Amino acid sequence: MAVSPRTSTTLRLVAIGALAALAAGCAGTPQHDSALASPTAASPTASTAGAPASASELVRTADFTAKAERDGWHASVRDGNVVYCKEYMPMNSMIPRRTCLSKAAVKMQMLAEEHQRESMQRAGAAACPTGTSCQ
């Protein structure tokens, strides 16, 4: 069955339009996390009572923010709350995704990653007794 050049061009334009609409829809739909809706996310410049933050609270927040940035998280403000966002490449995808979490959720994730690292190091140390060469 032969397709006329005019029909072929029309089909190509429809396919390109559909792909463009799909790409625009994917790019325009933000990923919402249940942790974002958490009212416990605190601003770094004010305590939960609305009073100015103490010096020690600011230092703790600065220390956490620096550690989070070393792990690839970037602080931003959404709906008046501080959230930490990170971009990553999902498995089997070339499209990067961005996930944003509250401070508490990022702390939990960083703690879980640290425990996983420690358990892997312990497992490696147990497999290679001291005084032997495992290389």
Image (cartoon, rainbow, N blue to C red):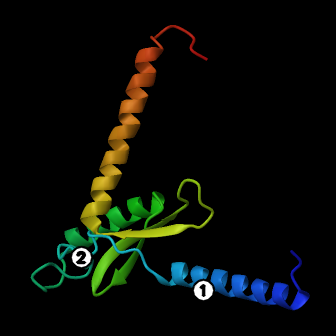
Q: Nearer the viewer, residue 15 or 116?
A: 15
Percent x, y of residue 53: 19, 79
Residue 105: quarter of image:
bottom left
Compared across the picture, whether 96 is left or right of 46 comes to: right
Using the numbered discs, state the Cα–Cα distance from disc 2 to disc 1 in whole angstroms: 29 Å
Looking at the image, is 32 positioned above or below residue 109? below
Which circle, 2 or 1, is nearer the viewer? 1
User: Residue, x 16% and y 78% (percent of image)?
Assistant: 47
Graded by Cα atoms within 10 Å as few (under 14), some (14 to 19) or many (20 or more), the crowding at tag 2 reads few
- Label 1 neighbour load within 10 Å: few <14, some 14-19, many 20+: few
Residue 95, horizontal then vertical, whole percent: 59, 67
Location of residue 114 with respect to 68 vertically, above or below: above
Quadrant where the C terminus is found in the figure = top right
Q: Which residue is painted at 58% across and 80% down in the image?
A: 22
Count every numbered label the image shows and give the total.
2
Q: Quadrant of the N terminus?
A: bottom right
| Residue linked to disc 2 | 37
Q: Which kind of residue does numbered mark 1 sit on?
A: Ala
The residue that mark 1 highlights is 21
User: Secondary structure under badge 1?
Assistant: helix
Q: Position of residue 100 (x, y in %)?
A: 38, 71
